[in-house]
Image: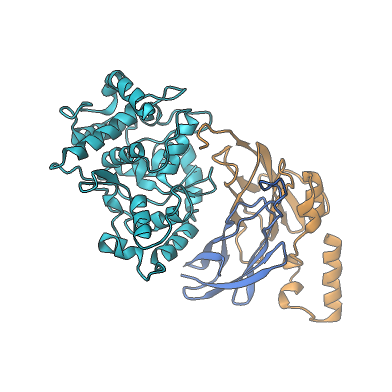
Chain colours: A cyan, B blue, C orange
Amino acid sequence: MKTLKTFVLGAGLAALSQLAQAADSGFTLETVDPEADRLALQQYYQKRFPGVPLEEYVNGIYAVDPASREQWDALMEFPPYEFDLEEGQVLFETPFANGKRYADCFDNGGIGIRQNYPYWNSEEGAVKTLEQEINQCREQNGEAPLKWKKGDIAKISAYMAWTSRDKPFDIKIPQDDPRALQAYLDGKKFFYAKRGQLNLSCANCHLDGSRILIRADLPGPTLGQPTHFPVVRSKWGEIGTLHRRYEGCHRDTRSVPLPPQSDEFRKLEYFQTYMSNGLVVNGPGARK
Amino acid sequence: MSIMRVKAKASGERTDVKMMAKHIMETGQRKDKAGNVIPALFLSEIEVKHSGKVVFTANLGPAVSKNPYFSFSFAGGASGDTLEVNWKENTGKSGSETAEIR
Amino acid sequence: MSMNRRSLVKAVAAGGALMGLSVLMPRVAMAAWAKEAFEAKEQGAAIKALYGEDAVAESAEVVLDAPDIAENGAVVPVSISTELTNVESMSLFIENNPAPLAAQFMIPEGTRADVSTRVRMGKTTNVTAVIKADGKLYRATKEVKVTIGGCGG
C-alpha cells in the first residue's frame, strides 16, 4: 500500500524525535519491548497530569479535564448508550436462521471475554478484533456480515463489552510467534508516524497534545483510549465502533481514511489496547 | 414496546426519579436526501403519577434532546411502589407504562 | 391561556365534580400542551403565549444551571431549581432556536422545584428559565456558547 510505505520510511526519523515522549523501547524487532513501552506510557501520564490515578484513564479526556467532565457527569446520570445495550443484548441472544447463536462461536458463550480482544491469531497470522469475530460468526452461520461502523455491530459489541465491564484488559503478544511482536511493532509505528496533509501522527494529538484544544475539541489521552469503545458520540448522535473513529479521525486530519478493520487499524488497535493492559473494560462509553 | 426507562429510588421521605424515553424527537427542521422536510415527531407530554396523584408533568417541544431525559423528586413513595408514566406524541399517539420504585 | 384556565376552574366549581380531583386544585390546572407557545418563533411571543405576559423580572431566586460552553449542542444538560414556595411551573426558553420554548414542567405540591433535562441548541444563545410561583413570574437568563469542534468525523 502506497500510504503505508511512505510513512514507514518517514517513521524512522519521526520516531526518534517522538522517542523521548513515551516509548521506552525502539522501533525495530530487536529493540522493541512492549512492557517497557506500556510502563513508560503510564509514567508519562503520571508526570503530565499529576494526581490522576491510572485507573481513571478509562474515562478518557474526562479523567483530566474538569470542565468537560461536569457535562459528562450530567450525561452519565442516565447514559445515552442504555438503549443500545438493551438492543445489543437482544441481538446477541437471538438465534440465527440456522438455530445457532453468537454464544456458540465464542469462548464462555461470548460473556466476559472482551478484555482479551484484540488478539494475535497464529493460525491466520493476523490480529483479530471482536467485531471481526462477530461477523465471522455470522458468516459461518449463513448470515450476512454487518457493516463495521455503526448500528447492530456496535450494539452487539457494546453488549459484549458490558459483560466484561471492570475486567482488566489482558492483551497478549505470544512469545512463540514473532509475527505477533511484528504486529505490535507495526501498530506502534503507525501510532507515531506522521501522515497526511496536516503531517500529523496519532501521537501528536493523543500523546503530546492530549488536552490541547483543536478548535473546541480536546484530544483524549491515548492511555485507556480503546477501553471505552464502542461509543455513543454526541457528534454522531448514536453508537459507533472504534474503527469508525479511526477512519473519521484520519478524515479530520486530512490523511487517507483507511477502511474499518483494515490491517493497519487492527494493528493500531492491538498496540493501543496492549498499552492499556491493566485498565478495565469500560465499554460502551459516552463521549463528546 | 415500552419506551420509558425509569430509575426511581425511594430515599427517606422522598423518591428521586431519573427517566429517559426512547424517542427520536424529530424536530421538523431536517430534510431527507431528496430535499423533503422530515416531519416533526416528538413526545409532547409526559405525566408521572404515584398512587393516582400526578407527581410530574412535562410539556415538551422538539428542542428536547433525542431520548429525552428528566430528573425530578417528589415527596413520598416507597420501595416497591408503582409509578405510572403516561405519554403523548405530537401525532396524537399515546402510551401508558409502569415502573417500580426501588 | 390563563383566561381559559380561570374560567374552567370556575365552571367546574359551579358545576360540581365533573373531572378528577386534580383539576380542582388550581395549581395543577390545565397542563395541556400550549400549542401557540410551543410554536411561537420569537421568545417574547412564546413567553407571552405561555404566561399571558412577557415582562418578567430577573430574579436570583431562579437557579438556572447550564454550561458556559456546551460540549455538544445536541445534548446540553440544563436544570432549573428554586427555593421559592408554591411553584406551579418552570419553563425553559432557548432564544435562538427556531421555536424558543423548549419545555414546560408542571410542579404539583410535594414535587421539588428542581428539574433537570437535556436540550438542543443550534448555536450560541441565551437560555432563560421562567418560574411561576404563587401567581407571580420570575426569570433567570444565561448565555450558553455552542462551538465548532475540530474532530467531527
Front position in the image: C93 or A241: A241
| Relative to A76, B56 lies left or right | right
| Relative to A129, B102 lies left or right | right
Q: Residue at x 66, y 44 (%)?
A: C60
Q: Residue at x 46, y 56 (%)?
A: A152
Residue A282 in sight from this viewpoint: no
User: In the rendering, at what x and y percent does residue A2 appear?
Assistant: 37, 27
Front position in the image: C122 or C59: C122
Residue B38 in sight from this viewpoint: yes
For residue A270, above or below residue B78: above
For residue A61, above or below residue A161: above
User: In the rendering, at what x and y percent does residue B52 appear?
Assistant: 63, 77
Which image quadrant is residue A176 in? top left
Please state, as top left, top right, bottom left or bottom right, where the N terminus of chain B lies in the image.
Answer: bottom right
Which image quadrant is residue A257 in? top left
Task: Count the labels in the image.
Answer: 0
Which image quadrant is residue A48 in? top left
For residue A128, above or below residue A111: above
User: In the rendering, at what x and y percent does residue C20 appear?
Assistant: 73, 78
| Relative to A146, C38 lies left or right | right
